[in-house]
Image (tube, rainbow, N blue to C red):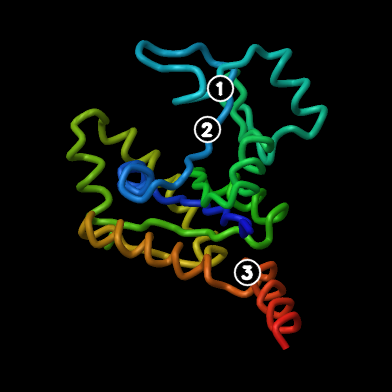
Amino acid sequence: MINKGSLIVISGFSGVGKGTVVKRLVADYGYDLSVSATTRPPRDGEVHGREYFFMDRGEFENLIDYGGFIEWTQYVENYYGTPKKYVEESLGRGKNIILEIEVMGAMKIKEQYPEALLIFIAAPSIKSLRERLAGRGTENDAAIRKRLKKATEEAADMEQYDYVVINDDLEECIATVHAIIQSYACRKANNMDFIQSIKNELKETL
């Protein structure tokens, strides 16, 4: 008997380290990671089915028409979306699958999957977030201000998440997120088949 897996949505401010947290969860604990689809061309070193499912516009738009995406958006003339089939197959195999996604997409997923677990990764303070963005050395002040403005918009929906985890220490953050997911898997709604099997066994035994 395989219990259905959990759908885990992880979001966070740009520069907070959520991508690193997700990669470690997949590497250390074997979670599935949802692979997004896009119409942009692959970059050097990117592999179809690993970084993205690369599609042409016609293929992507056909999937939109058939309801093949949990959520999708268009950004700088390219489509990006979360294929429904990939997610449903992982859940059906009893796997916990992670979606690393921005806030607007997370809200769309919550509408379709009310049982999804939403985790927001935050920095200890906006001052430290700004320092992390500046520390990358890849963005000027204008770009940093743009990212902080985006963070202001995202902060408006932070209370829609089930958990907020502060990434002050990477190892502690990873361990905390893993513990939350493990605990969430034990909720009653995710174990109804097991509960019924226990009842049936007791009935047969007695």
Q: SS at mark 2?
A: loop
Q: Nearer the viewer, residue 115 or 161?
A: 115
Q: CA distance from mark 1 to mark 2?
A: 7 Å
| Residue 34 in the image: above or below residue 49 | below
- Residue 184 drawn at (x, y percent): 51, 68
| Residue 131 in the image: above or below residue 36 | below
Residue beneath disc 2: 35
Badge 3 amino acid: Asn
| Residue 204 in the image: above or below residue 47 | below
| 174 sits to left or right of 72 | left
Q: Nearer the viewer, residue 167 or 183?
A: 183
- For the point 78% across and 21% down, which residue is it? 62
Q: SS at mark 3?
A: loop
Q: How many marks?
A: 3
Residue beneath disc 1: 53
Badge 1 amino acid: Phe
Q: 10 Å neighbourhood of mark 3: few (<14), some, or many (≥20)?
A: some
| 170 sits to left or right of 166 | left
- For the point 44% across and 65% down, which residue is it? 182
Residue beneath disc 3: 191
In the image, which disc is placed on residue 67? none
Name the image quarter holding residue 51: top left
- Residue 164 drawn at (x, y percent): 42, 65
Q: CA distance from mark 3 to mark 2?
A: 26 Å
**Quarter of the rendering occupied by the N terminus:** bottom right
Contact between labelled residues 2 and 1, with CB atoms less than 8 Å apart: yes
| 205 sits to left or right of 52 | right
